[in-house]
Image (cartoon, grey):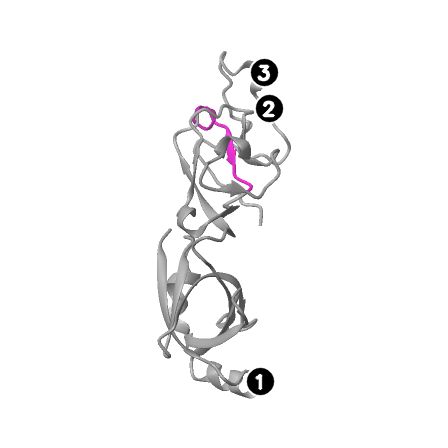
Amino acid sequence: MKSISINGSQRESVGKKPTKALRNAGQVPCVIYGGDKPLHFSAPELAFSKLVYTASAHTVVIALDNGEEYNAIMQDIQFHPVTDRITHIDFYQIFDNKSISMEIPTQIVGSSKGVMNGGNLRRPFRKLKVKAIPSKLPDFIEIDITELKIGSKLYITELENEDYTFLHPENTVVCQVRRSRLAIVDDEEGEEGEAGEAGDVPATSQTDEAAE
């Protein structure tokens, strides 16, 4: 997995007034958990742009002005309700020999026969949660939809990988192709095609639907 470096300064004062002063100066107050004790630091808001405003997953190397470095992942982020600026970020320290849980983006590959016949591709998840040691975390999880016909479903058990473990129930559906009103069902698909449902929109290309 790719890593992003962030240069920051350790914070000694963590009250409301020092925190407000940091934000007014364009700094983001942050905390690193997972070590012996929480570590407070701050960094310029622009330093987090490649970490926050992307669909990709990254680990983070936090380099402080006292010479110390911490490997971490972003755990939580808060935004201002009006300006949408970053107001606080929580990180979780990671270690080479200790498994961590992380949400990993999914990436669709292949051309579904069901979609080419007019079906709708449904994707309930744009990210899947996995558990692994940091060196085994993937940049993305590849989902091959080539074999999906109209009415077919792809379960998370079909994505099993020896490098990481999925933290979802075995009956989790990660992709399915549902029939639209204009879908064509050929002889090979037969009874696999689902009856069209009210509200389904005809589609002739692959479309994503995320469950927010």
Under circle 2, the secondary element is: loop
Graded by Cα atoms within 10 Å as few (under 14), some (14 to 19) or many (20 or more), the crowding at tag 1 reads: few
Graded by Cα atoms within 10 Å as few (under 14), some (14 to 19) or many (20 or more), the crowding at tag 2 reads: some
The relative height of residue 183 versus residue 160 in the rendered view (above or below) is above
Which residue is label 2 attached to? 194
Q: CA distance from mark 2 to mark 3?
A: 8 Å
Report the magenta residues as a range: 113-124
Give the residue type that dot 3 points to.
Answer: Glu
Which residue is label 1 attached to? 16
Q: Residue at x 57, y 19 (%)?
A: 192
How many circles with numbers are drawn on the protein? 3
Q: Position of residue 211 (x, y in %)?
A: 58, 46
Which residue is label 3 attached to? 191
Give the residue type that dot 2 points to.
Answer: Glu
Q: CA distance from mark 1 to mark 3?
A: 63 Å
Under circle 3, the secondary element is: helix
- Nearest the viewer among 137 and 67 is 67
Q: Which mark is residue 148?
A: none
Instruction: Say if mark 2 contacts mark 3, CB within 8 Å.
Output: no
